[in-house]
């Protein structure tokens, strides 16, 4: 059996291993008590620092979480609709109010183009231009459109957009706020109506002053001059002249009385003092009596009355109807030349329970531009300014006829005359 002797290389390797072991024995020698205490203190401080950093990270995480939750709450529960759009105009996100405004769930809105909810093509184009302007210029502006809800109803809206960029300065998305401005538009319309009424009232005041200055001045001047001349006339020598001036005074006083009656009637109607009190009476005898009364004050005109239909009794307010018929006949006489015929026609429709009265003259007629205003207060046609009148008669007649569930209309041609139609229902 042979014995293997270690080589020189084995000896050297063994020596190196021994030296390394000795070094490790030196390094792993026990620490002194002071060194151990210092090491423990250092470890404790590092542990405390680490705990503080962990706590700061937790607090920061909680703050971020709370801020995100607060932002989501502000976004979702904001009083106006908020829409987040991409560069193409597609909806990326929408809050609760935005869904309510359109009447559509959030899931159905996301991914759709916002412009499909804008009512008209013209307004859609306007919104696209607005969005493009925001994308290019980053300036806040707005556009007003009509928005159509899911149920088809519309509301007036104002859209305000803001461009949001990413870290590199490129467009990230566009935030759009949708305001319902229907109430503001309604208020604007109401203000415009109020301003229009105020303007109309000022025009009425102007017309009244113009009318009063003319209509009151003329009869008062006639009365004053007649009284002045009467003082100079001798009873025996100028009896006929005295009588002529007395008649002028009577006519002027009658004219003033008619003006005051118009004002009184208008005031009573507007205060609700005049009521509709219908009764049954014979319309033929009614109109014939009015014609007989009118003949005494219009001896130079002739009258023609025709009745068509079997029905003769009507159920209307007799007093109000008399005011209406008398006034329209009076206008026909006033604006017709002497010797002309005033044609009055009454027509009843038994089956339809409708009664019509028409009054036709051969007078000056109504100019085309004046026709839309003929029933307005204090309005007088241009070709009627030289005739006596307040401009209230037709306005009063229309209101009285409407109180009796009726209507009034007319056709007219300048220098050829007019026909006024009064129609009454359920009479």
Image (tube, helix red, strand yellow):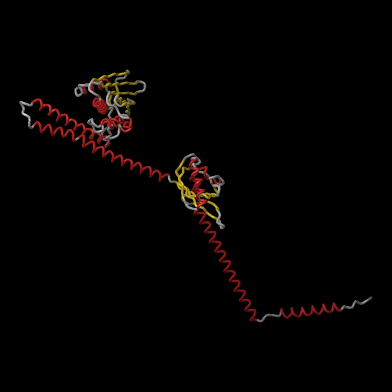
Q: Quadrant of the C terminus?
A: top left
Q: Between 203 and 69, which is closer to the camera in this rendering?
A: 203
Q: Quadrant of the N terminus?
A: bottom right
Q: Position of residue 63 (x, y in %)?
A: 53, 61
Number of numbered discs = 0
Q: Position of residue 271 (x, y in %)?
A: 26, 37
Q: Is residue 368 left or right of residue 110?
A: left
Residue 143 visible in the picture: yes
Q: Position of residue 205 (x, y in %)?
A: 26, 39
Q: Is residue 19 above or below residue 395?
A: below
Q: Between 76 and 122, which is closer to the camera in this rendering?
A: 122
Q: Is residue 185 left or right of residue 365?
A: right
Quadrant for residue 251, please give it. top left
Q: Is residue 322 above or below residue 74?
A: above
Q: Is residue 423 above or below residue 111?
A: above
Quadrant for residue 197, please give it. top left
Q: Position of residue 23 (x, y in %)?
A: 74, 80
Residue 322 visible in the picture: no
Q: Which residue is found at the position 89% from the left and 78% from the top? A: 5
Q: Is residue 69 left or right of residue 406?
A: right
Q: Is residue 284 above or below residue 255?
A: above
Q: Residue furthest right?
A: 1
């Amino acid at each position: 059996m042979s014995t293997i002797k270690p080589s020189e290389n084995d000896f050297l390797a063994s020596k190196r291993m021994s030296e390394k072991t000795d070094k490790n024995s030196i390094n792993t020698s026990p620490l002194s008590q002071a060194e151990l205490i210092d090491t423990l203190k250092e470890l404790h401080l590092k542990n405390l620092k680490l705990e503080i950093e962990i706590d700061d990270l937790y607090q920061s995480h909680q703050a971020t979480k709370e801020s995100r939750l607060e932002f989501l709450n502000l976004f979702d529960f904001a009083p106006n609709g908020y829409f987040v759009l991409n560069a193409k105009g597609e909806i990326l996100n929408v809050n609760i109010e935005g869904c309510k405004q359109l009447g559509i769930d959030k899931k159905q809105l996301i991914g759709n183009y916002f412009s499909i909810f804008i009512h008209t093509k013209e307004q859609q184009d306007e919104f696209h231009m607005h969005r493009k302007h925001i994308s290019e210029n980053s300036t806040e502006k707005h556009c007003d459109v009509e928005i159509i809800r899911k149920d088809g109803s519309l509301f007036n809206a104002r859209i305000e957009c803001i461009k949001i960029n990413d870290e590199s300065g490129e467009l990230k998305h566009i935030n759009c706020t949708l305001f319902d401005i229907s109430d503001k538009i309604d208020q604007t319309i109401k203000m415009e109506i109020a301003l229009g009424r105020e303007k109309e009232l000022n025009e009425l005041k102007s017309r009244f002053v113009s009318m009063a200055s003319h209509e009151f001045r003329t009869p008062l001047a006639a009365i004053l001059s007649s009284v002045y001349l009467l003082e100079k006339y001798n009873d025996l020598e100028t009896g006929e002249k005295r009588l002529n001036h007395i008649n002028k005074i009577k006519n002027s006083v009658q004219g003033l009385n008619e003006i005051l009656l118009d004002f009184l009637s208008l005031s009573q109607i507007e205060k609700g003092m005049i009521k509709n009190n219908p009764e049954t009476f014979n319309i033929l005898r009614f109109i014939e009596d009015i014609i007989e009364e009118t003949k005494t004050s219009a001896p130079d005109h002739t009258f023609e009355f025709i009745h068509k239909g079997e029905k003769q009794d009507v159920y209307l307010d007799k007093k109000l109807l008399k005011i209406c018929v008398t006034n329209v006949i009076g206008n026909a006489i006033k604006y017709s030349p002497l010797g002309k015929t005033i044609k009055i026609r009454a027509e009843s429709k038994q089956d339809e329970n409708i009664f019509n009265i028409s009054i036709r003259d051969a007078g000056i007629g109504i100019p085309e531009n004046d026709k839309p205003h003929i029933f307005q207060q204090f309005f007088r046609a241009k070709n009627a300014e030289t005739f006596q009148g307040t401009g209230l008669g037709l306005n009063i007649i229309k209101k009285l006829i409407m109180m009796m569930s009726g209507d009034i209309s007319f056709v007219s041609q300048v220098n050829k005359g007019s026909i006024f139609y009064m129609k009454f229902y359920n009479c």
